């Protein structure tokens, strides 16, 4: 089941079904090496979603700003390698959405518990805006907010369920988006937790 949200943005509902267990396993393996943590923001706050990364570059927020780094600031070791299963899923989803040859080198894992959200924002730290972003939702349903190119544009909300994949590129790549919160019902596998995994091709800052 595929739905074009607007040019460049494709929602692949239930793209992942029985194989979700494999991706959850990969996620837990990453989190064993690089634990989920609540990062700080330049504005002095703490993010309510806990995050970690795998792949060559990981997304890091601190009071200094946002950036992609090759080293996990917590362990001072390189981020864990991107599991082959996750790389293949991202590449396959991008291909399905019309972006063949996607080579993600940065994979951000978000963990939402009760009360966690992610305010409206743009993803603009990746260096090369021509590459799409692929996201996989796992576990508890999240309420996704999807706006336009300007913060004041109308925002629509819809549910992102376990196994749903979103591919964003082209004109939709810089649209504002966020997570309003979580649906009340627990998920049979992850309970009250929602995970989201995003895949990007990042050109490292020099
Ligand atoms: C639209 N994550 O990690 S995924 C993020 O569910 C992020 O954790 C949300 O926003 C989450 O930056 C939403 C869907 C998504 C991801 C990246 C996008 C939508 C996007 C980049 C550009 C436009
Ligand atoms: Fe985002």
Image (cartoon, rainbow, N blue to C red):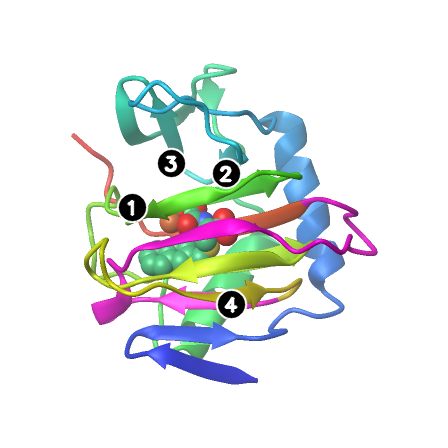
Disc 3 element: loop
Between the residue at mark 1 and the residue at mark 2, the CA separation in whole angstroms equals: 13 Å
Q: Mark 2 points at which residue?
A: 54
192 is higher (above) or lower (below) than 17: above
Residue for point 72% across, 65% down: 19
Q: Mark 4 points at which residue?
A: 158
| Tag nearer the camera, 4 or 3 | 4
Residue 122 highlighted magenta (yes or no): no
| Mark nearer the N terminus (2 vs 4) | 2
Disc 2 element: strand
Picture quadrant of residue 159:
bottom right
| Mark nearer the N terminus (3 vs 1) | 3
* Mark 4 close to ligand 1, CB under 8 Å: no
Q: In this view, does 120 lie to the left or right of 14?
A: left
Disc 1 element: loop
Q: Where is residue 177 in the image (x, y as percent from the top left)?
A: 36, 55
Q: How many labels does the image show?
A: 4
81 is higher (above) or lower (below) than 145: above
Between the residue at mark 3 and the residue at mark 2, the CA separation in whole angstroms equals: 7 Å
Q: Which of 35 and 194 is in front in this view?
A: 194
Mark 3–mark 1 contact, CB under 8 Å? yes
| Mark nearer the N terminus (4 vs 3) | 3
Q: Mark 1 points at which residue?
A: 202
Q: How crowded is mark 3: few (under 14 residues within 10 Å), some or many (20 or more)?
A: many
Q: Position of residue 116 (x, y in %)?
A: 57, 38
Residue for point 72% across, 47% down: 25
Magenta stretch, residue numbers:
164-193
Q: Which of 197 and 50 is in front in this view?
A: 50
């Amino acid at each position: 089941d595929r739905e074009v949200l607007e040019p460049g943005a494709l929602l692949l509902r239930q793209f992942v079904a029985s194989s979700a267990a494999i991706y959850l396993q990969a996620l837990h393996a990453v989190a064993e090496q690089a634990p989920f943590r609540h990062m700080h923001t330049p504005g002095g706050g703490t993010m309510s979603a806990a995050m970690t990364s795998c792949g060559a570059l990981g997304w890091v927020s601190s009071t200094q700003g946002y950036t992609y780094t090759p080293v996990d600031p917590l362990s001072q070791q390189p981020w864990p390698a991107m599991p082959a299963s996750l790389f293949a899923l991202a590449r396959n989803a991008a291909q399905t959405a019309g972006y063949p040859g996607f080579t993600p080198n940065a994979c951000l894992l978000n963990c939402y518990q009760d009360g966690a959200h992610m305010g409206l924002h743009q993803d603009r730290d990746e260096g090369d805006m021509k590459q799409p972003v692929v996201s996989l939702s796992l576990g508890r349903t999240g309420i996704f907010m999807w706006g336009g190119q300007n913060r004041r544009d109308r925002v629509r909300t819809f549910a992102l369920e376990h196994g749903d994949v979103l591919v964003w590129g082209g004109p939709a790549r810089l649209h504002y988006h966020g997570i309003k919160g979580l649906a009340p019902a627990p998920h049979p596998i992850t309970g009250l937790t929602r995970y989201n995994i995003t895949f990007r091709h990042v050109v490292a800052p020099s």
